[in-house]
């Protein structure tokens, strides 16, 4: 049986097919069959921050990774540049 605090999430799953992203609900017998299989994939995922400021982080980090992987820049300067960009864009 699901915890009381999960009732709103179960309601969304039942009414709209939303997939709960809480590990305690993954594969729960309380989930509708159509959602249950998809919810089990939650246990294989990595939690990611969803704060709006994080949008200012993803592109500079992605660009740094690409520069390093393509051999265009060494890791240290690529990520120092990303850090500078993130700090400039943060506020």
Image (tube, helix red, strand yellow):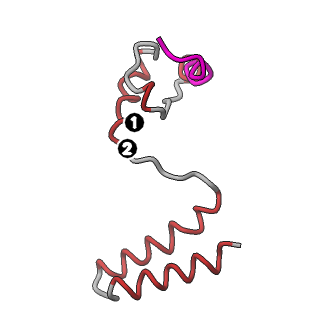
**Image mark for residue 81:** none
Displayed quadrant of residue 16: top right
Q: Is residue 34 left or right of residue 89?
A: left
Residue at the spot 50% in from the left edge and 16% down from the top edge: 2
- Please say if 78 is above or below 30: below
Residue at the spot 36% in from the left edge and 82% down from the top edge: 67
Q: Position of residue 27 (x, y in %)?
A: 37, 22
Residue density around tag 1, few if under 14, some if 14–19, many if 20 or more, within 10 Å: some
Verify CB contact (< 8 Å) between mark 1 and mark 2.
Answer: yes
**Image mark for residue 45:** 2
Q: Residue furthest top?
A: 1
Residue at numbered disc 1: 42
The magenta region covers 1-10
Q: Quadrant of the C terminus?
A: bottom right
Is residue 29 covered in magenta?
no
Displayed quadrant of residue 86: bottom right
Residue at the spot 65% in from the left edge and 76% down from the top edge: 89
Secondary-structure class at tag 2:
loop
Q: Residue furthest right?
A: 91
- Please say if 1 is above or below 51: above
Q: Is residue 54 left or right of residue 82?
A: right
- Please say if 20 is above or below 60: above
- Mark count: 2
Displayed quadrant of residue 26: top left
Is residue 7 covered in magenta?
yes
Secondary-structure class at tag 1:
helix
Prevalent SS, magenta region: helix
């Amino acid at each position: 049986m699901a915890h009381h605090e999960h009732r709103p999430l179960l309601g969304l799953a039942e009414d709209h097919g939303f997939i709960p992203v809480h590990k305690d609900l993954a594969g729960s017998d309380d989930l509708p069959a159509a959602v249950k299989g998809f919810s089990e994939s939650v246990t294989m995922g990595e939690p990611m921050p969803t704060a709006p400021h994080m949008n200012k982080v993803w592109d500079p980090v992605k660009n740094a990774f690409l520069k390093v992987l393509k051999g265009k820049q060494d890791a240290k300067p690529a990520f120092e540049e990303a850090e500078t960009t993130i700090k400039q864009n943060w506020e």
